[in-house]
Image (cartoon, helix red, strand yellow):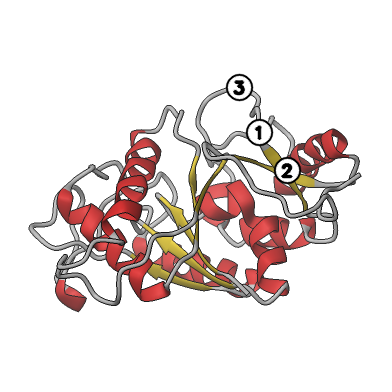
Amino acid sequence: MAQILVVGPHPDDQEAGMGATIAKLASQGHDVLLLDMTNGEPTPLGDPATREREAARATEILGVKRRMLRVEGPARGFGGDSAWGGHALSNRWIEHTIEARRAVAGVIREHRAAILFVPFYEDAHPDHKATTRIVEDARFDAKLTKADLPGEPIYPKWVFYYYATHLRWVANPGFCVDVTGFEGKKIAAMEAYHTQFVAPGRIGAQPKGHGVREWVEHSLGYFGTRIGTLYAEPFFTKEPLGLGSLDGLVM
């Protein structure tokens, strides 16, 4: 079974981008850790305590583990505390810094991550773009010897990109994962973020009059048609996938 790290700029990005796949990987026995770069605040309807409860509930639904990144140095943005020997990054203030790279590299080494999932690198949200750049570079840093980082050096074999973009365009994935049977987990995990996806007055991508269920089923259903399944989630890879046989392909 694989050690998998799924990095999100804010709690709910992982669920929105690949929640069904996360649930499926967990059900298969993989060791999946969700890493939040920030606590997601501020948002129009949220607050730190509420967002923490929402994230905990979503994590429970998906059956995985979760932690928030802690970075050395002075806090910037909307606050942050010094607990656990560092501070949390702030929503809207994620920056590609050496300190952030080292912090993510430390998590990669501690989790012994062989597979990384990050947001697709073309996005309107600066936090999403910065997160992906940080993780891509942290992948390299994690393998360095004499780097004064926790754990032993490791170089994750794969970096895959999930789609949770703020651009109005259709994903052009390199591959899709059949998630039929796990769509309900994604819906429930996203609905756990009541302040972000359910509460009246939220600012979201759903068409007026449509809730999370319709949004998820329509999206997963479209990508399911691309690979001949009921539901699927799209992903991109810059590096070619290697196949030992065609047995794993959905025909």
Task: Kindly report which numbered mark, 3 or 2, lies closer to the viewer in this rendering.
Answer: 2
Q: Which residue is mark 3?
A: 169
Whether label 2 touches label 1, CB < 8 Å: yes
Q: Residues within 10 Å of mark 3 (few under 14, many from 20)?
A: few
Crowd band around label 2 with a 10 angstrom C-alpha radius: few (<14), some (14–19), many (20+): some
Q: Can you identify the residue that label 2 sits on? A: 176
Q: Is residue 202 left or right of residue 103?
A: right
Q: Quadrant of the C terminus?
A: top right
Q: Amino acid at mark 1?
A: Pro
Residue found 62% across the figure and 73% down from its top = 30
Q: CA distance from mark 3 to mark 2?
A: 17 Å
**SS at mark 2?**
strand
**Residue located beneath label 1 in the image:** 173
- Amino acid marked by disc 2: Cys
- Select label 1 or label 3 by which is in front: 1
- Name the quadrant containing residue 80: bottom left
- Name the residue nearer the viewer: 134 or 200: 134
